[in-house]
Amino acid sequence: MCPKCGETTRAPWPAGVPSGTYGPRVQATVALYTGAYRLSKRTTQHVMDEVCGVPMSVGTIGPLEQATTEAVAAPVEEARTYVQAQEVAHLDETSWRQGDKRAWLWVAVTSWVTVFVVRLSRGGQVARELLGERFGGILVTDRSSAYNWYPVRWRQLCWAH
């Protein structure tokens, strides 16, 4: 029951969203801190406790990250499928750290949807993975050799590069 208005409250998330000790907002916040903001699990645990008032153990963070990955798997696949069907896609990659290994953050951008993946490779196979085998649109890229597999007549060099 809501202490302010006295109404009975329901779960604010749709059916199918995982629930557990922590709700989807806490789960999403943890994923945001460790994923997008790249905070360590220990720092995330501290921020959740000190700033958000949500105590949790460091060991709880990994399962929350995994649950978030599973919860967004279908929409992410939908976004990839959308990108692969577009007439124009922009691809780029930038260096990234994945633990103690060097990796690359790849991005595929269209007018409406953007998809990111982190891979340990900067090779053309990642670009193919993002675009799919049937992509037939205009591909806008820099001059990286990772895109040399795509036909020149369907490539546009990015003017910013």
Image (cartoon, rainbow, N blue to C red):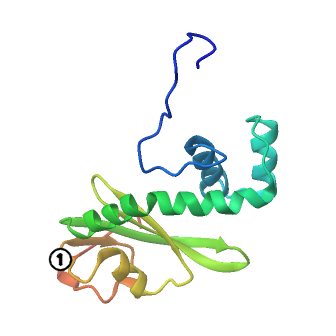
| Left or right: 51 as drawn, with respect to 148 | right
The local crowd at label 1, few if under 14, some if 14 to 19, many if 20 or more residues have their Cα within 10 Å, is some
Q: Position of residue 55 (x, y in %)?
A: 79, 42
Q: Secondary structure at mark 1?
A: loop
Q: Is residue 144 above or below residue 66?
A: below
| Left or right: 12 as drawn, with respect to 131 | right
| Left or right: 88 as drawn, with respect to 17 | left
Q: Picture quarter containing residue 85?
A: bottom left
Q: Position of residue 19 (x, y in %)?
A: 56, 48
For the image, the number of numbered tags is 1
Residue nearer the viewer, 14 or 38: 14
**In the rendered structure, which amino acid carries the disc numbered 1?**
Gly
Taking the view exactly as shown, the residue that stands out farthest to the bottom is 149
Which residue sits at x=61%, y=54%?
31
Q: Position of residue 125 (x, y in %)?
A: 40, 87
Q: Position of residue 124 (x, y in %)?
A: 40, 86
Q: Which residue is mark 1?
A: 136
Q: Is residue 58 above or below residue 155?
A: above
Task: Give the position of the N terminus as an image quadrant.
Answer: top right
Res 2 seen here = yes
Residue nearer the viewer, 139 or 62: 62
Which residue sits at x=29%, y=52%?
112
Residue nearer the viewer, 32 or 161: 32
